[in-house]
Image (tube, coloured by chain):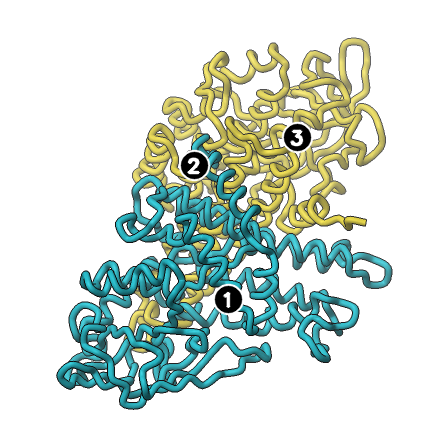
Amino acid sequence: MNFEYSEEQTMIKDSVERFVREEYGFDVRRQIIASDDGYSREYWAKFAELGWLSIPFAEQYGGYGGSVDDVAAIMEALGKGNVVEPFVPTVLMFGGLLAHSGNEALMSAYIPRIIAGKCLGAFAYLERQSRFEMTDIATTARSEKDKLIINGEKTVVLNATNADSLVVAVRTGGEQFDRRGISLIVVDTDTPGVEVTGYAMMDGQRAANIKFVDVAVAKDCLLGALDEGMDVVDKMVPEALLALCAQAQGVMETLNETTVNYTKTRNQFGVPISSFQVLQHRMVDNFMAAEQARSMLYRGLCAFGSGSVETEYERSRSLHALKAVVAKSSKLIGEEAIQIHGGMGMTDELDVGHFVKRLMTINTMFGDGDYHQKAFNRLSYQSAS
Amino acid sequence: MDVMFSQEDLAFRDEVRAFFSAEFDPALAKERQGGQGADYKSAIVKWQKKLHAKGWIAPGWPTEYGGTGWSVTQKFIFETERGAAGIPDVVPFGLKMVAPVIYTFGNEEQKAKFLPRILSSEDWWCQGYSEPGAGSDLAALNTTADYAGENYIVNGRKIWTTLAQYADWIFCLVRTSKEVRKQQGISFLLIDMKSPGITVKPIVTIDGKHSLNEVLFEDVEVPVENLIGEQDKGWTYAKALLAHERTGMADVADSKRSFAALKARASDEVNGGVAMIEDPVFQMRLSDIEMELMALEYTELRVYASMAAGGMPGPESSLLKIKGTEIVQAIQELQLQLAAYYGSALPAASEHDVLGHEYAAEARSSYMYGRAATIYGGSNEVQRNVIAKMVLGV
């Protein structure tokens, strides 16, 4: 039994934390999110140089061959700095789909470039009507000779404005909501007929709605088997969720620390407000919420780790419970951080609100807390009769 | 990161399981649940004697006094298997509370006199800490022990004394000096419950049962050899004991078992033709608890893993008592909710004789008595004070 990050993982985590401390101050971050790109090319090149972009990928493509723990170690540290660079969309979503596709040609073509920092990616799956149901896909791809012709619209595609390439989830068969009949296609964003309308998310990330008008791509851009794209998605999503929850952990603990420190320096009625028991007890509740989230994170990491003997059923339960617990903890911690900071908590010039908005954005990723709790309930509670 | 046990630990787990399933009489669990009836003491002593005969009665003690010499992981496995099997913990006052004080701070005569009888469950102990005016502010205690040659003369009142009606001995914090800071004038005394001048008065609790008591001391003579350590240093010894007690209060295995029972009942109970376990609102209530419990299970594992690695329990250990008791209560609440009307009906003659739902009486009484979980052992508010000070530094 072991719940410590390994020496190597600690080294990675320390190096990300050092970067955040020394180079990713709040003012730097504000400049980055206000820039046209919404991320720093210079830093992205640095991430590549330091090997961070290689962590989850197999060694044959130049990757580090890391596990979910390795990724979690990085993500926690990125969370502490509220780093806005598109690690999740590029490395874990776009890269994760490629890595689980089994498509040698596409993996060889894209993964080394992702690792080198030369290719930004995105995963276009959401549509206006689909909310959290990933199978609710109306965008179509029809077959024409050796091409697939894509038509439809995707929404809130994270990092799409900067992405060189996308994985697009399309319907090639079946009806709306059918799991079968969904295919994944790799599409370069400069392909004719791809119309990207960009905007910013409240946490500074860039996203876009994308129209596909008779976009023609070669059939060998199919990722995974035709109609069986969800098999690949189902392998990527748990890993991305674990990573997002690790990132949320970094954010939550930073908020708690910031809040406690603030109460020690803020004086009212002639004393630091940290001396008020009503605030102490609430900060203890915030601390406990973060610890419980960390325990769920470890539970998830153990369940999905390389040596895990956990059943598929228990893995799913752990993952749903993790996302639901993180949702509850991050809502509590975020709201309390603003409240306890008082008027200052309301200001854009303080980092607190920015951390909170990151937590809120993470909450919606791949289903919010209620969505996952309902999924947990469906798995766990059935009448014996 | 992993949750694997070693082959040796798994073999140990199997041995513990086999022993529990062969030796534990489920009637005891029922007896305990049924309350502190006449047979309760003999049933629990019988089980504790079995554990003693096996050499497993005191895993927490050093081996020289009768401990098992188990690793941290083995102790964890033993506790987990106990809870999973629905076996009540040993009565803690002797084995887990006074014994560590005796073997840590007592003299050789005291160790020889008391420890073997605690191990064998010959002596039943109770705890004399709280007083009417000293609850969370324990150091405000007022029971006095005046030094008079060979004896202390003890006068005062102790309250909330659990199971004192069965006790042979009571360990008390008493005031031996009023001259100094209130924590400094306190001593740790061992008192024979048969001493003249002691009166035990029952306190009936909101579950309608009698497990708490008031213990009155009127000019009770206590031989000076029953003083632990030095006079006026008792607070230090008691605090060391509290630190000893801090882990192992999460009761994860016990709660997992009672949660499983709750689910089974929710599957049986029907409203409008739909099993309660299928009710979306009830499902949310269930999973609110179960997810907290899944998290707490790993919080507890984290604490044990860091202790097994030779470290001290980290800040996460401080939340075990708060979260553990909140979960215990939350399960009891849903159990009572399932019992609906029957939960409110008092049994006519015997505790188990309720129409319709045999668990309803137990659901009511465990809910009512369960309110104590967030009060005893340092109320959850006091626990929050401790975390605020020790972990948050405010």
User: Closer to the observer: label 2 or label 1?
Assistant: 1
Image spot of residue B367 (x, y percent): 60, 70
Q: Is mark 1 on a helix, strand or loop?
A: helix
Question: Which one of the lettered chains is coloured cyan?
Answer: B
On screen, residue B276 versus residue B13, left or right, reads right
* Residue type at the position of mark 1: Ser
Q: Mark 1 points at which residue?
A: B42
Q: Do labels 2 and 3 share a chain?
A: yes
* Residue designated by label 2: A1
Q: Position of residue A188 (x, y in %)?
A: 63, 20
Going by the image, does A45 lie left or right of B233?
right
Chain containing the residue with disc 3: A
Q: Are circles 2 and 1 on residues that touch, CB within 8 Å?
A: no
Q: How much space separates mark 2 and mark 3, taking CA atoms?
A: 28 Å
Q: Position of residue B117 (x, y in %)?
A: 34, 62
In this structure image, what is the colour of chain A?
A: yellow
Q: Residue at x 64, y 33 (%)?
A: A312
The residue that mark 3 highlights is A234
**Residue A113 placed where, x, y %?**
50, 17
Which of the two marks, 3 or 1, is nearer to us in this view?
A: 1
> Which residue is the extreme one toward the left?
B149
Q: Element type at marker 2?
A: loop
Q: Are marks 2 and 3 in contact (CB under 8 Å)?
A: no
- Quarter location, residue A122: top right
The amino acid type found where label 2 is placed reads Met
Name which of mark 2 and mark 3 comes first in the sequence: 2
Q: Which residue is drawn at 28% across and 73% down?
A: B190
Left or right of A164? Residue B170 is left
Q: Mark 1 lies on which chain?
A: B
